[in-house]
Image: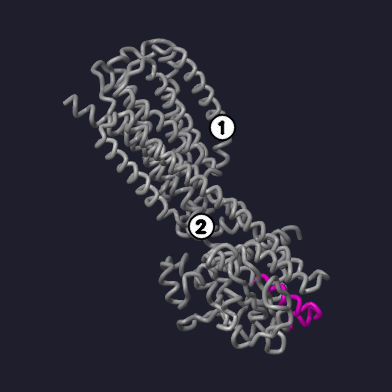
Amino acid sequence: MKGMLFTLTAMVDFIGMVVALWLALYLLGRGYRSRITLRAVVVLLAMSGFFLGAYTNLNVQIPGTAAARATLLIVGLTTWQDLTNKLLPEANRKKLYWLVIGLYGLGLITIILLMSTRDAFVGEVGNVLWVGRMGMGFPYLIYGIIQIVASASILYNFSVGAKVEGALQNRYFLIASILVVSTVAYGVLALAITPPLPRLVQDFLILSSIVLLGFSVARHQTLVERRATLHDFPVSALAVLGLSSIYILIGWLYKFSSIEIILIVALIVITLSIFNLVREFLDRLRSKDENEIRRQLRQLENNAWLGVPLNNRLQDGLRLMCKMLEANGGFVAVLQDELYVVLTTFHSIPVGRELPFAEFSCDDICEPPLEMAGQVAWIAPGFGGGEQVAVIGINPPKTRTQYSDNELDILVEAADRIGTIVYMHNLRPLGKENLQHITAELESHEADIQAKSQALMVTLANNPDPKFIKLVEEGLRNLSDYITLGQSELTKHLNVSAETHIERGKAVRQLLVEAIETLRPCKERPAQPLPREWYSYAVLHDAYVEEVPNREVMARLYISEGTFNRSRQKALRGLARYLMEKKASQGDVEKQ
């Protein structure tokens, strides 16, 4: 019986160390900017150290290590309490901030007392399977107080707002917190009764709580910001834990000691996690550079009415695009009398060359005609006012054989902005009345009620911040979850106020649905396949309001995944712009 208890305790401690270490480093790489994620990482690292110490103590006993493990429990418990505080509404969070600071201070005092009183735990030598006991004294009193206060505070935080009944990820976190409190209760019970209680129960409760913590934080933080997380989380877990299992088997076959095996596994987990951390850091740097170039493209688009020659603006935009894509060169050709004439070039087709209208008119990105295939890799249409007014081509990449899907999306985005620049330049010599008249004709011709000239100018002058676009996207993903919407930052951006967060969530949903409906070109939806002007409405309404799978939406529109993603991003930007414009117009009305 004792041998089985030893084996089970060792297994729980071993698994706890590996899982806690991997979850900590995984969350650090995927969401290190989040305050909630960073606190979860601290908890998981502390518990990883706790399990490593507990496992080592089963095989090699070192006097005084029980106090070190107790300090790690204090670090984890106080940080967990702080984490639940961050889930509270802002008003409640500020009111209870003193409690967070007080618990951190009390935790520091407790750690100092435990580390300075190395014999605080009595009968430590020889006790590897039972919950440690403390001698009566001041350290015992403080240690008990902080555990009880932190546990009560965690439950209180959930009772006043951190518990979100409608959000599944917070249900997991609530269960995880209850398990933590149960661990404290079990420890207090072990100190109160005479027969020693097995440490296995306490360690298993801690393991269960950190698994639920890691999963809930990954779901709450990472899933919202990174669409790949649904696949990334389980695949990463299988990869790391699978490799760890292989090394455990190898260590067992070569008769490594238990300490050597757990240290090897810890090294494997750390090595793989550091590799992922570095990759994530480089990806974020690349994304930052792309966002900066996109910002410069937006500036070019916004300044299209300034007295700068068209070819100069296009040359700047072309250079930015080639720099972003690491292309050997590219060109921009504009529509002139049923021909596309190369207006500016960068190490590509010479200026002034005429391109056939039929061969270079396309609805989406495509490969060039055969006679240009060796020099030009891809061409993309530039639209303005609902018509193709330009064509943008890029040469093959400098250091690779082909472009990635993400880079082709960037090409399409740059083509859209260059098309807008050309369109606005062509309209510039006209007065406002003529501009409105031309826009009205375009509306009638394409049944696109959104293409009003004034709205176009407002849109270009108010490009939404990428962070706001992500907030809108997050809101659409939680369109049926009033509670999550009510706690979203969208409530502040959209000036939504109500007595409860449920009512705020309903108001945000109503605003988002109304915004999607503004993208509807006309009342009656035509038969499939839908015309191009319906793409923005269809990808948002079908995917988020009707909750139709993306594959089915693509099938309805008869478009590829790349075209679907580009249409969705374009629609999201338009939706975010509309919400900004509506907020600005409401502010003007209130001032009047």
Secondary structure of residue under mark 2: helix
Q: Is residue 496 above or below residue 329?
A: above
Most extreme residue toward the right is 307
Comes first in the chain, label 1 or label 2: 1
Name the residue at 27% across, 40% down. Answer: 249
Q: Nearer the viewer, residue 141 or 563?
A: 563
- The answer to whether residue 515 of the structure is visible from this angle is no
Identified by mark 2, the residue type is: Lys
Colouring chosen for the image of the structure: one colour
Left/right placement of residue 101 relative to residue 218 reads right
Identified by mark 1, the residue type is: Tyr
Q: Main secondary structure of the magenta part?
A: helix
Callouts 1 and 2 close, C-beta under 8 Å: no
The verdict on residue 433 being magenta is: yes
* Quadrant into which the C terminus falls: bottom right
Number of numbered markers = 2
Mark 1 Cα within 10 Å, few/some/many (few <14, many 20+)?
few
**Which residue position is annotated with label 2?**
506
> Residue 194 falls in which quadrant of the image?
top left
Range covered by the magenta-colored residues: 416-437
Mark 2 Cα within 10 Å, few/some/many (few <14, many 20+)?
many
**Which residue position is annotated with label 1?**
97
> Residue 121 falls in which quadrant of the image?
top left
